[in-house]
């Protein structure tokens, strides 16, 4: 045993007179055998993980009218919205899926020049309300020009904001939107007053969005820890952010997965590190990439060492379920937020040239082939899983499959 002392039960002291080389050899072999047995006794046996079952899925393409390309999905549990873009002006399109699968245009009212050019980054809906953010590159530096939208299925209009709300010196990109109770919250990044970029959140009062201070809060970066969040989801009356913390240490850099939770729109924030590790490297970069919550309990998807991972975050505990299927994600892709199907969880994971569908039912796992292309949005609608994918040329596809 390494590090054994005279007080250790595994310490062996050899007493007696000095012996010749001939007498040392047998005694050495006995000690070597004893050490091997002790090491074996201290090693926890690895329990074999049952292989994942095959998940049978039959994908059907959903054809959108008039050359429209899908980019994102939104649902409040009863209605499904498809965020898309097309050749007309405005480029952004919003379609409502009826009970029989019919697609109906939701009227849009753009007001600023960039609202005519913008593409949806996220659309959310709750209790008949619809809110969204869109972006279009422009200006001398080609930065995103953000637009915010609000309304109902009867019509969604742009809410014009002063340039400095989401732009100007120090601005980072926006990452998403979610409801805290009935109020929308926007996630993004902004230059820290200390180091790098902070995680930033905006809340809305009437039609005006306001960014809140993050430096010197759990959302702020420091010289030792740089924080980043790329996804936001509803969590009761608050929200949960998914991302990572980069630890800057002398001679090393560690990237670890983390979530940030708030009981309301804007804090107080709590950062929770997520356990992780791979079979070959317990310090491989890891990141939380999306979450879905039922009450205070959240399922968080992400990667560890480039492989798919899943966490269960309850109010006071965080754990990883056993037997997670090993799926290697292509570079610059992310596992989508989990989809709840009763007591089961389904995750769409990029893999190879397409995707893999992972389902967890109790302690059992099953995997199946997902649609081709890189998955960018997935939701449950009735007893079906709807998925938006993008291809290398930027075109998108919308497919669906019944979940048995």
Image (cartoon, rainbow, N blue to C red):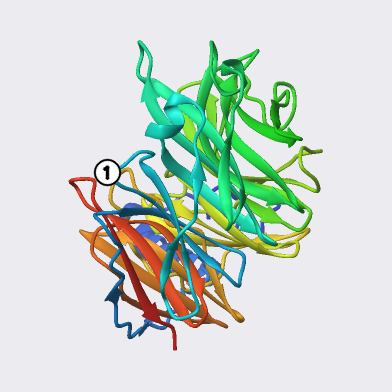
The location of residue 22, given as percent across then percent down, is 31, 59
Q: Could you say which quadrant of the image residue 353 lies in? A: bottom left
Asked if 283 appears above or below 354 in the picture, the reply is above
Instruction: Indicate left or right for 241 with 120 as reference.
Output: right
> Which of the pair 373/163 is nearer the observer?
163
Q: Residue at x 37, y 60 (%)?
A: 23
Classify 10 Å Cα crowding around label 1: few (below 14), some (14-19), many (20 and above). Answer: few
Residue 274 horizontal/vertical position (percent): 60, 51
Residue to which mark 1 is pinned: 87
- Whether 96 is drawn above or below 50: the answer is above
Name of the residue lying farthest toward the left:
393
Residue that extends furthest to the bottom in the rendered view of this protein: 404
Q: Kindly indicate the quadrant of the structure image that contains residue 262.
A: top right
Q: Relative to the observer, which residue lies in front, 357 or 134?
A: 134
Give the number of callouts. Answer: 1
Residue 328 seen in the current view: no
Residue appearing at x 76%, y 58% in the figure: 236
Question: Residue 272: x, y in percent?
Answer: 68, 46
Report x, y in % for residue 96: 48, 63
Q: Residue at x 78, y 58 (%)?
A: 316
Taking the image as shown, residue 321 lies to the left or right of residue 142, namely right
The local secondary structure at tag 1 comes to: loop
- Of 57 and 380, which appears nearest the observer? 380
Q: Quadrant of the C terminus?
A: bottom left
Q: Is residue 82 visible?
A: yes
Compared to residue 272, the image places residue 99 above or below, namely: below
- 115 and 225: which one is in front? 115
């Amino acid at each position: 045993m390494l590090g054994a002392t005279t007080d250790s039960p595994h310490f062996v002291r050899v007493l007696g007179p000095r012996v010749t080389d001939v007498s040392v050899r047998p005694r050495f072999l006995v000690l070597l055998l004893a050490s091997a047995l002790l090491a074996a006794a201290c090693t926890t046996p690895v329990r074999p993980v049952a292989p994942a079952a095959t998940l049978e899925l039959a994908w059907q393409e959903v054809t959108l009218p008039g050359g429209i390309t899908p980019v994102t999905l939104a649902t409040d549990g009863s209605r499904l919205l498809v965020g898309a873009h097309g050749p007309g002006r405005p480029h952004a399109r919003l379609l409502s899926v009826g009970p029989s699968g019919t697609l109906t245009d939701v009227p849009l009212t753009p007001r600023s020049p960039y609202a005519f050019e913008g593409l949806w980054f996220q659309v959310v809906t709750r209790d008949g309300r619809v809110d969204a953010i869109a972006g279009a590159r422009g200006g001398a530096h080609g930065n995103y020009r953000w637009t915010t939208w609000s309304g109902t299925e009867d019509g969604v209009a742009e809410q014009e904001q002063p340039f400095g709300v989401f732009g100007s010196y120090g601005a980072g990109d926006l990452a998403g939107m979610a409801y805290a109770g009935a109020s929308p919250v926007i996630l993004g990044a902004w230059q820290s007053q200390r180091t790098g970029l902070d995680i930033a959140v905006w809340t809305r009062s009437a039609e005006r969005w306001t960014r809140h201070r993050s430096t010197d809060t759990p959302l702020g970066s420091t010289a030792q820890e740089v924080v980043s969040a790329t996804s936001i989801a509803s969590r009761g009356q608050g929200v949960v952010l998914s991302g990572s913390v980069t630890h800057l240490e002398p001679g090393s850099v560690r990237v670890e997965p983390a979530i940030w939770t708030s009981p309301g729109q804007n804090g107080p924030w709590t950062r929770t590190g997520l356990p992780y590790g791979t079979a070959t490297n317990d310090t491989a970069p890891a990141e939380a990439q999306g979450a879905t919550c039922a009450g205070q309990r959240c399922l968080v998807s992400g990667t560890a060492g480039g492989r798919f991972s899943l966490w269960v975050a309850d109010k006071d505990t965080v754990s990883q379920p056993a037997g997670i299927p090993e799926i290697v994600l292509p570079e610059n892709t992310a596992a989508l937020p989990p989809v709840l199907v009763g007591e089961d969880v389904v995750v769409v994971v990029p893999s190879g040239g397409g995707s893999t569908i992972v389902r967890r039912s109790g302690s059992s796992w099953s995997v199946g082939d997902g649609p081709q292309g890189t998955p960018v949005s997935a939701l449950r609608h009735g007893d079906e899983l709807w998925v938006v994918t993008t291809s290398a040329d930027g075109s998108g596809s919308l497919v669906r499959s019944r979940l048995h």
